[in-house]
Image (cartoon, helix red, strand yellow):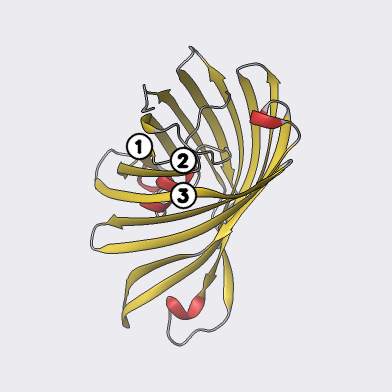
Amino acid sequence: MFPLTRLSRVAFATAFACALPAVAADTIEPFDRGASDFELYMQHEGLGHTSAQQAVAGEMLLGYGLSDRVSGFVGAVLAADGHYLDASGSFSFGAYGNTYASGPWSIDVILSLAGAEDALTFSPLVEWNWDAEPDLAAWGCYVRAGLEVGGLDTAAGPRRSVVYPMTIGAYRTVRPGHQVLFEFEGGVADLAGEDPAASGHAWRSSALSFGYNALVSEAVEAVTQVSWMPGRDGQDGSAAVMVGFIATLPGGP
């Protein structure tokens, strides 16, 4: 089945949302039963800015199929600036499952918890999928939305940051084992969580991404992606590139 099942976007974005919000574009699919998924990604963000404004990161994820429709994962991220300094790391874990599937429609629910430095981020997400053919054999589209709640240290003291992320994407399987993806993602932040004197909501980071995934063997998928982040608050836009691979391991029964 193509593409190989994974949860790279949720793990990477949740585990290190402040550093690298744009990662591999794709739908979310359950893992095979047992310890069946290994993923590795490398990304460079902020291209077009100075090295001090850039970021590099790597992520590793292990997935475990708990049942035919429920999976769990653990992930770790290491990140630094464009000089490969000021390094930091994070760890995440969570579970997700397919709660509804009928004809071309399916709904997945994802729960994850990530820790970076001295703060945690809890993220429940829902993904709605429409697939023209089973097993992603032709084309389809998806919408992912939810909530990200995390701790935030401000001048006014500890605050609770609340962001409402949203992703809209589409894929096309151009031939067996080869798939292209287009995706837009962004988020709306609750300003009161950042400043007790503020109110309302504001648009936060956004990105347009193009991805190309290809099977290089029966069990390994290569993943590539380029993204553009429009400028905001008087800053110029920037680009990001990501490469990685997904390996399907021998699973359980």
Q: Amino acid at mark 1?
A: Leu
Which residue is rendered at x = 53% and y = 38% of the image?
29
Q: Is 11 left, or right, of 238 in this rendering? A: left
Q: Position of residue 47 (x, y in %)?
A: 48, 38
Task: Pick out the residue farthest to the right.
Answer: 132
The local crowd at label 2, few if under 14, some if 14 to 19, many if 20 or more residues have their Cα within 10 Å, is: many
Q: Which mark is residue 234?
A: none
Give the number of the disc on residue 96.
3
Query: Which mark's residue is nearer the viewer, 3 or 1?
Result: 3
Residue shown at the point (56%, 27%) measured from the top left: 3
State yes or no: discs 3 and 2 in contact (Cβ < 8 Å): yes
Q: Which mark is residue 61?
A: 1
Q: Are marks 1 and 2 in contact (CB under 8 Å)?
A: yes
Disc marking residue 7: 2
Give the crowd class for mark 1: few <14, some 14-19, many >=20 residues within 10 Å.
Answer: many
Looking at the image, the residue that sits furthest to the bottom is 197
Residue 166 seen in this snapshot: no
| CA separation in Å, label 1 and label 2 | 8 Å
The amino acid type, in three-letter code, at marker 3 is Tyr
In the figure, 163 relative to 15: above or below?
A: below
* CA separation in Å, label 3 and label 2: 9 Å
137 relative to 21 in the view: left or right: right
Mark with earlier residue (3, 1):
1
21 lies left or right of 55? right
Picture coordinates of residue 211, whole percent (x, y): 59, 31
